[in-house]
Image: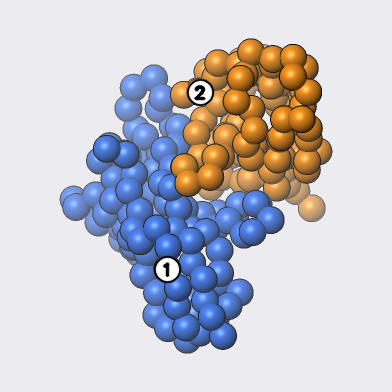
Chain colours: A orange, B blue
Amino acid sequence: DGGITQSPKYLFRKEGQNVTLSCEQNLNHDAMYWYRQDPGQGLRLIYYSQIVNDFQKGDIAEGYSVSREKKESFPLTVTSAQKNPTAFYLCASREATNEKLFFGSGTQLSVL
Amino acid sequence: KNEVEQSPQNLTAQEGEFITINCSYSVGISALHWLQQHPGGGIVSLFMLSSGKKKHGRLIATINIQEKHSSLHITASHPRDSAVYICAVTRNYGGSQGNLIFGKGTKLSVKP
């Protein structure tokens, strides 16, 4: 079945550590997105990519980095510069701008 | 002021009741999305619409472009409808063309 797979489901980060969240899709979608969800707030865009080897900063990109070396994969690294990383992270993809979004099941990141 | 506002924030209903969730937006859009997020965190796209009305089973979504308003209706509600319902709009201008703005969500609880 086609879909988006995020891993791990739960992740713990030590102070000063970089961690990487995985997002893989087999839907053949060009566009992929990373969102952050905090309690009581709407999803906020961290980074997005509309084509392989290209990505753009979203509204809250500071402290995060991404890569898009393959169409299927869009990993997100939460760097030590992100001082408040505890949140639920969601990856999404879609075929084109006005197409339906498909979401992964999310990763809950917490700080030890 | 948020660009996408949902009401109510929380909603409790008895099984069988007709439910309405509202979404108002203040930006130019090319599409509006209704999403459903279950307690595990995963998000499913329910509807994407740019005009008129769409129906899927017991769910109905409407949009009024002139009034910048959309509603999600659930007929004959059931406890399995309990979830957070999120409204999102696709912006149609500027450098963020194609990107989404999300409402904060409406938490629905349907009691048996």
Q: Which is nearer the eye, B73 or B11?
A: B11
| Residue A2 placement (x, y as % from top left) | 75, 48
For the N terminus of chain B, the quadrant is: top left
Q: Which SS class for mark 2? A: loop
Of badges 1 and 2, the one in the foreground is 1
Residue at 56 percent of width and 69 percent of height: B82
Residue B2, by quadrant, is top left
Residue at 57 percent of width and 24 percent of height: A47
- Residue A45 is labelled as none
Chain letter of disc 2?
A: A
**Is residue B107 something one can see in this rendering?**
yes
For residue B98, side relative to residue A94 (left or right): left
Count residues near mark 2 (Cα–Cα under 10 Å), then give few for <14, some for 14-19, many for 20+: few
Chain letter of disc 1?
A: B
| Residue B40 placement (x, y as % from top left) | 69, 56
Query: In the rendered view, would you say A72 is above or below A6?
Result: above
Q: Which is nearer the eye, B4 or A38?
A: A38
Q: CA distance from mark 1 to mark 2?
A: 30 Å
- Give the residue type at disc 1: Leu
Q: Which residue is mark 1?
A: B11
- Give the residue type at disc 2: Ile
For the C terminus of chain B, the quadrant is: bottom right
- Residue A60 is labelled as 2
**Is residue B88 something one can see in this rendering?**
no
| Residue A108 placement (x, y as % from top left) | 70, 40
